[in-house]
Amino acid sequence: MSDFVNYIFDRGIPKLFEYSNKNLINPSDDGNSNENKIIYSYNDYGYRGGNITNLIDNPDKIITIGCSYTFGIGLEEHETWSYKLSKLLELPYINLAWPGGSHEYVMWQIFNVVSSLNYKHIFVLSPPLGRKFELLDFKFLNQNHNQYRIEENSESINSAEFDDFKLKTLCNFYKINLIHCYDYGYVGDFRWPVSKDTTHFGEDWNEHISNEFYLKLNNEGI
């Protein structure tokens, strides 16, 4: 098995085999503190959360897509905005987020979903700009996402901005609810306590994002 995660297309959701039915401890944990330990549970398709096979054919569900901010690095599952939004809407959810996910990764998952699945709504939390589209093994969770940023020259910056434009256009075309993560503060902003890994937003921020998506949905009627 190479460092790249093997995946197949299975009824609209690529199955990430290396994570199927496994639990991973927060890689940033030093092993000495139970207080900061997070257990990430992976479902039957390899994404974070409970098993989703019974949701594949259910049209009354929401889909959430994004990077580690949506995956919930440093958070218990019930602290993530995906979980909180599903409770607000009283609908089950499938979280297709992946740590380090790029704009291209998000667009790839959008096409998988809209071409193959029934759903009530899709919610996208746009990742930071400048990432490459890579599906790496679990060691990727232990890396700073800046290590995977493309070189910041004028050409790459223009490319990243174009990726942002493409994602916005795609979401508008499919009537997908879109929020950019950095439009609502930054890690270290005094308003938002950090998560247990200290490099991601904590539960308060996730609560705010779920409320913003809920308001956006009601105001725009998407």
Image: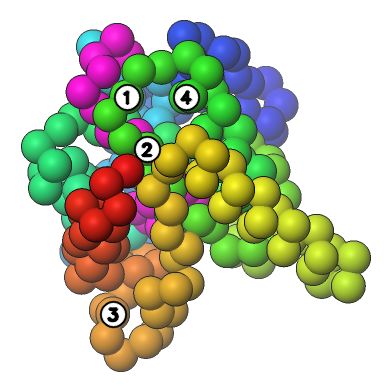
State whether residue 176 appears in this view: yes
Range of the magenta residues? 55-73
Q: How many C-alpha atoms fall within 10 Å of the one at disc 2: few (<14), some, or many (≥20)?
A: many
Whether tag 2 and tag 1 are in contact, CB under 8 A, the answer is yes
**Viewer-nearest of discs 3 and 4:** 4
Q: Within the magenta stretch, is there residue 58?
A: yes
Q: Is residue 136 visible?
A: no
Q: Position of residue 208 (x, y in %)?
A: 23, 67
What secondary structure is found at the residue carrying circle 2? Answer: strand
Q: Which mark is residue 119?
A: 1
Q: CA distance from mark 2 to mark 3?
A: 25 Å
- Please say if the residues under marks 3 and 4 sit with CB atoms less than 8 Å apart: no
Front one among 178 and 152:
178
Badge 2 vs badge 3, beta-carbon distance below 8 Å: no
Q: What is the number of the mark on residue 122?
A: 2
Tell me the residue that label 4 is attached to.
113
Q: Which mark is residue 67?
A: none
106 sits left or right of 118 in the view: right
Q: Which residue is painted at 27% across and 79% down in the image?
A: 193
Circles 4, 2 touching at the beta carbon (< 8 Å): yes
Between 128 and 135, the residue placed more toward the observer is 128
Side (left or right) of 63 relative to 34: right
Q: CA distance from mark 2 to mark 1?
A: 7 Å
Q: Is residue 132 left or right of residue 99?
A: right
**Pointer 1 with pointer 4, Cβ within 8 A:** yes
Chain-order first, disc 3 or disc 4: 4
Residue linked to disc 3: 192
Disc 3 crowd, CA 10 A, few/some/many (<14, 14-19, 20+)? some
- From this view, report whether residue 206 is shown above or below residue 22: below
Q: Identify the secondary structure beneath mark 3.
A: loop
